[in-house]
Image (spheres, rainbow, N blue to C red):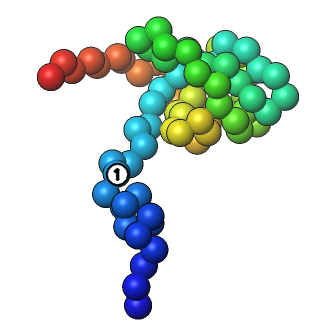
């Protein structure tokens, strides 16, 4: 069975990164987030979270709550 060439191409791409972010504002089901390095992004899936919550976010979607007291580890390559 042959596969779609586009889906074969997508399989070659690396998976999206899971990041930790802090919710800074909420508008309906969309949240504005700040990453530990200072980046800002928006994501869907706020649910019952409040401003100041630490969340896991991947590809513009909040996947769950992150522990608030996790240490930040940054590795440079």
Which residue is the extreme one toward the front? 5
Q: Quadrant of residue 2?
A: bottom left
Q: Is residue 41 left or right of residue 51?
A: left
Q: Is residue 44 left or right of residue 72?
A: right
Residue 6 lies, with reference to residue 69, above or below; the image says below
Residue 20 lies, with reference to residue 60, above or below; the image says above
Q: Quadrant of residue 48?
A: top right
Residue drawn at the location 44% of the way across and 37% of the way down: 18
Residue drawn at the location 53% of the way across and 39% of the way down: 59
Q: Position of residue 52 (x, y in %)?
A: 65, 14
Q: Nearer the viewer, residue 13 or 4?
A: 4
Which residue is the extreme one toward the left? 77
SS under mark 1: loop
Q: Position of residue 15 (x, y in %)?
A: 38, 48
In the picture, which quadrant includes the N terminus?
bottom left
Q: Nearer the viewer, residue 15 or 53?
A: 15
Q: Position of residue 9 (x, y in %)?
A: 37, 61
Q: Which residue is mark 1?
A: 13
Q: Quadrant of residue 11?
A: bottom left
Residue drawn at the location 28% of the way across and 19% of the way down: 73
């Amino acid at each position: 069975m042959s596969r779609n060439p586009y889906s074969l191409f997508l399989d070659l791409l690396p998976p999206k990164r899971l990041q930790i972010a802090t919710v800074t504002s909420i508008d309906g089901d969309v949240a504005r987030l700040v990453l530990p390095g200072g980046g800002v992004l928006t994501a869907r899936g706020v649910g019952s979270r409040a401003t100041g919550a630490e969340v896991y976010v991947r590809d513009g979607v909040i996947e769950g709550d992150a522990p608030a007291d996790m240490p930040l580890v940054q590795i440079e390559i």
